[in-house]
Amino acid sequence: MNAPVSPHLANQRDAFWMPFTPMRSFQREPMLFDRAEGMHYITPEGHRVLDGMAGLWCVNAGHGQPRVVEAIREAAGRLDFVSSFKMSHPAAQAYATRLCDFAPEGIDHVFFVNSGSEAVDTALKIARAYHHARGDAGRTKLIGRAKGYHGMGFGGLSVAGIGRHKIGFGPLLPDTAHLPLPYDRATMAFSQGQPEAGAGIVDGLEALLLVHDPATIAAVIVEPVTGSGGVYPPPRGYLERLRAFCDKHGILLIFDEVITGFGRLGTPFAAQAYGVTPDLMSCAKGMTNGAVPMGGVLVAGHVFDAFMNGPPEAIELFHGYTYSAHPLACAAGLAMLDVFAEDNLLGHLGSLLPFWESRAHALKGHPHVLDIRTAGLLCAIDLDPRAGAAGARGSACARLCHESDVLVRSSGDTIVLSPPLIISPEEIETIFASIEMALSRID
């Protein structure tokens, strides 16, 4: 039986300043989970809540995955910590090699960090440093995209395209600009996977060059599927045109695969799903199944090689973190790659995706639904905002789902779904039935 939360702990709730949380509302109605296993969170009172968000896009193999848990336990008893500044440990080398084998062909190196935010900032620094190393130090500008989310570091926030995240933190990095979101509800609503229309929106980059000399641009960074901004898959041909455009002008292309990496689209990374390989890829979340903080920047060989021209005793990149390639994180990452191989997670997911898509799009026509977008095991459901109360319907829908023991995420008036890859057809039905119930009850 679960021990009740002590009054002392309850009284200390406000000591924890929580991320992306309305603190006063949380203190009135705290949502607390005490344990987790498989597809479920478990509250201190023992209620089992079906996790429709894989934690926060990251628990891809389900909670408490035994091989990951055991790998962390064993690593903690063998080597609790060693720096990766001029030293390291065998698991870091082994994981880097296997991770590059998991990644698209041409990705030959990985720089380990501790989160998606750090991965993005590192990728942006590597991009600028790459041009500097090649004698092209004038390339400093960074191009992001509307609705993009790239973490909360100053670099990632500067190239991100969600305005409300930037309020109160300016000025941010100079020399940034943004592409338009490749989405038009009039022609793309209720698309399953990649919309057929819209590839021409990449021509917005050509328009930017009327203002910004392409010889000054270091990199373009996009999420292959816009994630936190609302699950917007790329139109057919969009990423291919973006890749060709960057090649034409000597600009590095960065994919932020923090959400789409590690199986979310039915392939190891979105780059493989869409057949487009970037120069740099940021990753995190699913690397360790969410069990240990970790992130990384996957680096193409030609980018790495540009740094390897000075004296062999010189540091090529003055960058890194105390916990880069932490032994426990590397152990968890290696175990996750074992799970992918031994449990055939991608094969399991591939067999489920048709039902996932059809069940999601069956919500078309329900009250308040404006659009539904699916990409792999991702889904966004746009609700018609209530007059004078933007976000209220999304919050009400998520609350009603939680009351029926299903956890979904609301972002404004968009319901976002991203469950663990181990989900069953019955659990898919439970998630969408809960949303249907909520939609029928909100005004």
Image: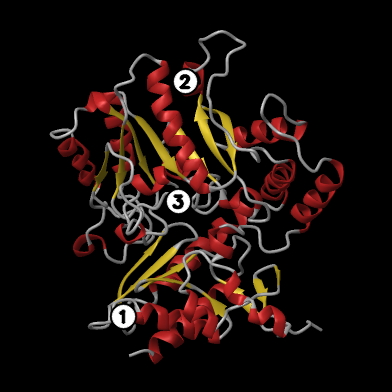
Give the alpha-carbon distance from disc 2 to disc 3, as whole Å. 26 Å
Query: Percent from the top left, x then y, of residue 62?
Result: 66, 62
Q: Residue at x 69, y 45 (%)?
A: 329
Q: Residue at x 53, y 34 (%)?
A: 298
Q: 153 and 107: which one is in front? A: 153
Mark 3 highlights which residue? 151
Image quarter where the N terminus lies is bottom right
Q: 224 and 295: which one is in front? A: 295
Categorize mark 1 by other alpha carbons within 10 Å: few (<14), some (14-19), many (20+): few
Circle nearer the viewer, 1 or 2: 2
**Which is nearer the N-term, disc 3 or disc 1?**
3
Query: Percent from the top left, x then y, of residue 371?
Result: 30, 70
Mark 1 highlights which residue? 365
Mark 2 highlights which residue? 302
At mark 2, the secondary structure is helix
At mark 3, the secondary structure is loop
**Which is nearer the N-term, disc 2 or disc 3?**
3
Q: Amino acid at mark 3?
A: Gly
Query: Percent from the top left, x then y, of residue 438?
Result: 44, 86
Image quadrant of residue 388?
Answer: bottom left
Categorize mark 3 by other alpha carbons within 10 Å: few (<14), some (14-19), many (20+): many
Give the alpha-carbon distance from disc 3 to disc 1, as whole Å. 34 Å
